[in-house]
Amino acid sequence: MTQWDVAIVGGGPAGLSAAYESARRGASTLVIEKAEHPRYKTCGGGLIGFTLSAVADRITIPADDRVERARFTLDGRAAFTRSTRRGPLLTMVRRPGFDDALRLAAEKAGATVRQSVAARSLEQTPDGVRIRLADGSESTARTVIGADGSSGITARHVGVEYGQVDLGLEVEVPISEARQRYWRGRLLIDWGPLPGSYAWVFPKGDLLTVGVIAARGNGERTKAYLRSFVDRAGLTGIEPVYDSGHLTRCRTESSPLRNGNVIVAGDAAGLLEPWTREGISFAVRSGALAGAAAADGDLSRYEREVATTLVPSMRAGTTLLAAFTRHPSVFHSLLRTPLGWRMFERFCQGETSFDTTVERFPVRQTLRLLT
């Protein structure tokens, strides 16, 4: 049995961000990861400005592409294309390389990353938390940070409650040099036929990530949407390198983030943007907040900081999703305007957040009419 100041369950962006912040503050820090880096992770892999800012002092982004042009369609119709005025909209990464860079940064800061072993259970003791591992060993820590996803043991231990659950389906397909030239620096977003749904094509060098997301409970229709979208993109018949599905879970605003000496971050806490379902920026930011609070021994500070820095954007995203679900064609038309495009561009580049955007008078009035 080994005693640590901070133990982190899960070695994704949230867990490794927590490890980096904890270790660089001098806390003895352990990361427990069931897989081995670099490992595949289902993810669109588009980094927005908030993510880039959060990790800029740690890693050099292993970018596969930088998107400067965006094409939008409404269930395959009414297409238009916009280009950025300055800098990329999104920086595209493959998660194996991105996560492994975060791992190396955490280890350089002093964290120990133990891979290929799963955490099986948690037990809170008078001195901290005991973690039982799949290989029969145990570790104890003053504080545990859960970053093992929404279906992991830490979310269950804390009692995280989810108010929105969506099904994401994704394929990654290899493409020819001619297709690489066409898609380089370009993405496609389609506002879909299912309530609140949309689809995407993201370029990653010799691969395209193609996916759809919609509310859980529409499995067959979501699969049909993906098939038709792949066909419209001219990618039918190409054997995918990866073909996967996953559920994204967004917390209720009153959901707990802590149970005793266990706190949760990232997907385990249900922290993501409800409309776009963007989660990487929430993972790295909440992970860093959790790691700093755990190292300093002030777990209630983590709860306060999430409430003030992340929850307002989530609340605004819920408002946007409600309006988008009712009126996707209006959103499509608004995005086509100079004002709508500039707002979208500024969000992607990390110049503004959704909560700031929806407080602008014309946006607030429009959303009031749509909802």
Image: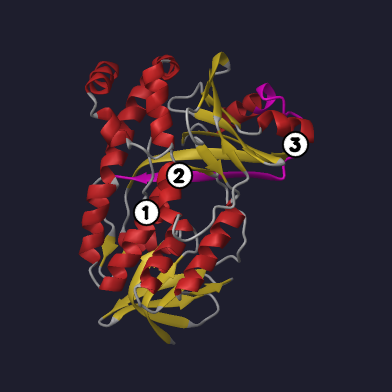
Out of 110 and 41, give the one closest to the viewer. Answer: 110
Q: Answer with mark 2 or mark 1, whichever residue precedes in sequence.
A: 2
SS type, badge 1: helix
Q: Residue at x 29, y 30 (%)?
A: 357
Residue 70 percent coordinates (x, y): 54, 26
Question: Quarter of the image containing the N terminus?
Answer: bottom left
Residue 191 percent coordinates (x, y): 50, 23
- Left or right of 128, for residue 30: right
- The amino acid at mark 2 is Thr
Tell me the CA gap for discs 1 and 3. Answer: 33 Å
Question: Quarter of the image containing the C terminus?
Answer: top left
Q: Is residue 264 above or below residue 71?
A: below
- Tags 2 and 3 in contact by the CB under 8 Å rule? no
Q: Answer with mark 2 or mark 3, whichever residue precedes in sequence.
A: 3
- The amino acid at mark 3 is Ile
- Residue picked out by circle 3: 175
The stretch in magenta equals 230-252
Q: Is residue 51 above or below residue 259?
A: above
- The circle on residue 248 is 2
Which of labels 2 and 3 is toward the front? 3
- Tags 2 and 1 in contact by the CB under 8 Å rule? no
Q: Is residue 234 highlighted in magenta?
A: yes
Q: Is residue 14 above or below residue 64?
A: below
Residue 145 percent coordinates (x, y): 37, 66
- Residue picked out by circle 1: 285
Q: Residues within 10 Å of mark 1 (few under 14, many from 20)?
A: many
Out of 281 and 251, give the one closest to the viewer. Answer: 281
Tell me the CA gap for discs 2 and 1. Answer: 18 Å
- The amino acid at mark 1 is Arg
Which of labels 2 and 1 is toward the front? 1
SS type, badge 3: loop
